[in-house]
Image (cartoon, rainbow, N blue to C red):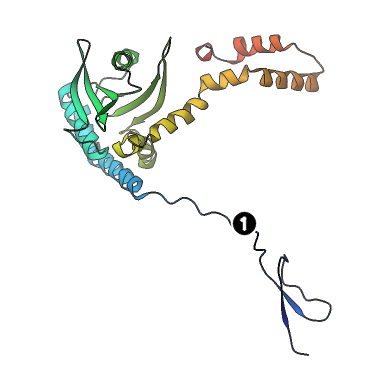
Amino acid sequence: MSEQTLSTSGATGDSPENGNGVIVKMNENPGTKKSSTPRATPKWETAARDRVKAAIRRYSKPLADLVARDANEGDTRLLVTDFLCDGLGYDKYEDLTTEYQVKGEFADYGIRIDKQLVAFIEVKRCSQKLNVRHLRQVQMYAVNEGVEWMVLTNGQVWQVYHMTGGLPVTVDLVFDVDLLAEGSAASKVDSLFYLSKDAFKRRLIDDLWKARAATSGRSLAQVLQSDAVVDAIRKEVRRQTGHNAEGKEICRILREEVIGTDLLT
């Protein structure tokens, strides 16, 4: 008897031999979902990331030289301007405004996207460590102009903050990059990409901030104090120890002994 091949729609498994010696060929179930392929990176994003990577490589030595000779703030601004243009894609004449006046004070840079002011940048000399006083300075500009995004930099360190209006305002550090620090160039590119013009105008930095804010220490501290979590802790304590603690007592212990005071609102 010659070998026969039968096709059975919807069967699964390897191709077995039936009782009559006939090899049964199994077809893939047409309803089976195939694994989806990863989303291809848009060309504009690849180009933007490559530009940031090239700029980090290009400006590392000039930046190190500025730090070594303790260059002044003016020289630091020259490098920052070049990095903003060559690395992050901003047009020096259309997108950047220097000495932006805010109620008698002057911000080092204002960034415009489609003629709309979207961020302030405050530059300090390359050897000066960025601190809270500098943040308050740029925050004042942002509050007065209704701007959400603030950048502090000394050329080497780039700190990007988001400000949410209200009483009081909420300021979140979204990322902090040191161009001269040890570490992979890829991780630096991954952060600074969001500050590029191409990413900024697509509001990708907003998505990054929301993700970071959702898992920030302050947000998780609020989750720990929620009724659902406190009740779950109470039940687990009872299961493990037999002690039936009050929810209010658990919440008090969380606030006083577990959660840092800087995270309590």
Question: Dividing the picture into quarters, in which one does residue 232 lie?
Answer: top right
State whether residue 121 is above or below residue 144: below
- Taking 69 as reference, is 236 left or right? right
Helix, strand or loop at label 1? It is loop
| Residue at 31% from the left image edge and 36% from the top image edge | 196
Q: Nearer the viewer, residue 249 or 144?
A: 144
Could you tell me residue 46's position as x and y percent?
34, 48
- Taking 228 as reference, is 159 left or right? left
| Residue at 26% from the left image edge and 33% from the top image edge | 114
Question: Dividing the picture into quarters, in which one does residue 18 lie?
Answer: bottom right
Could you tell me residue 25's position as x and y percent?
70, 74
- List the single residue furthest toward the bottom: 1
Q: Which residue is mark 1?
A: 33
Could you tell me residue 243's position as x and y percent?
80, 15
Q: Amino acid at mark 1?
A: Lys
Q: Nearer the viewer, residue 52 or 1?
A: 1
- Taking 257 as reference, is 181 left or right? left
State whether residue 234 is above or below residue 160: above
Mark 1 is surrounded, within 10 Å at the Cα level, by few (under 14), some (14 to 19) or many (20 or more) other residues, namely: few
Q: Nearer the viewer, residue 114 or 36?
A: 114
Residue 155 seen from this side: no
| Residue at 22% from the left image edge and 24% from the top image edge | 109
Could you tell me residue 177's position as x and y percent?
35, 31
- Taking 249 as reference, is 128 left or right? left
